[in-house]
Amino acid sequence: QQQVKQSPQSLIVQKGGISIINCAYENTAFDYFPWYQQFPGKGPALLIAIRPDVSEKKEGRFTISFNKSAKQFSLHIMDSQPGDSATYFCASLDYKLSFGAGTTVTVRA
Amino acid sequence: GAVVSQHPSWVICKSGTSVKIECRSLDFQATTMFWYRQFPKQSLMLMATSNEGSKATYEQGVEKDKFLINHASLTLSTLTVTSAHPEDSSFYICSARDTSGRGHEQFFGPGTRLTVL
């Protein structure tokens, strides 16, 4: 049973648009919430991460919003670029990482 | 950032043979390393957690006699797929947690594509 539910499965956005990916979790023991970016044939790379005592974290064009009471967190990619086309995974950590199912983002030029 | 390497990056083998995949943390020490398997268009599935100097902890449903893990040093873990069969064909990814105090961050290797004929 997947401990982290991620949506949507895929999305297409125009260059310059905003990509939004959502995740929800049940386990209140999770205390670290990273997002990973993966290109085809490559390993995942950490994009940005947040701890539950913070409601928002921004790094460049990437922002995590975190709602502890709703047990939800989301990734916003601002000013999306073709190079952002990849699969994005949310994850949650207690003693091990639990991954969402992934979202394939396609940015059209 | 911290670098994790894997070797080989891809391997093709015949059914029934064994294949060893190495995972190295290049610029940090890792008490704990993790092995994942990823099928096409799917998420990463944790296979086992490897602790330096002790036996690996396998996730439910993963055959420990088939997927042998050795974590001989703070910078090297190996995964051996024994008597490989076509259904073992997958993308295997390792990751390592820095023990020097970077907190929860795990660094992932580039992955190894295994194809069993």
Image: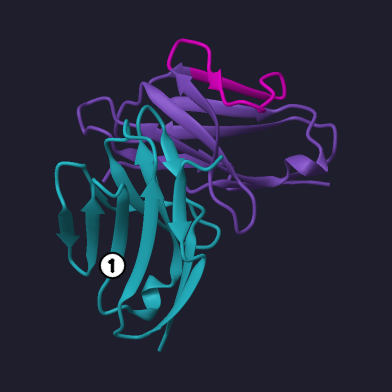
The letter of the purple chain is B
Residue B14 covered by magenta stretch:
no
- The residue tagged with tag 1: helix, strand or loop? strand
The x, y position of residue B38, in whole percent, is 59, 47
Rate crowding at label 1 as few (under 14), some (14 to 19) or many (20 or more) other CA atoms within 10 Å.
some
Amino acid on which disc 1 is placed: His
The subunit letter for the residue under badge 1 reads A
Say whether residue B21 is left or right of residue A94: right
Above-or-below relation of B77 to A75: above
Q: Colour of chain A?
A: cyan
Say whether residue A71 is left or right of residue A7: left
Highlighted magenta segment, given as a residue range: B52-71
Residue, disc 1: A76
Q: Nearer the viewer, residue A16 or B85?
A: A16
Task: Decide if residue A86 is in sight here.
Answer: yes
Task: Decide if residue B109 is in sight here.
Answer: no
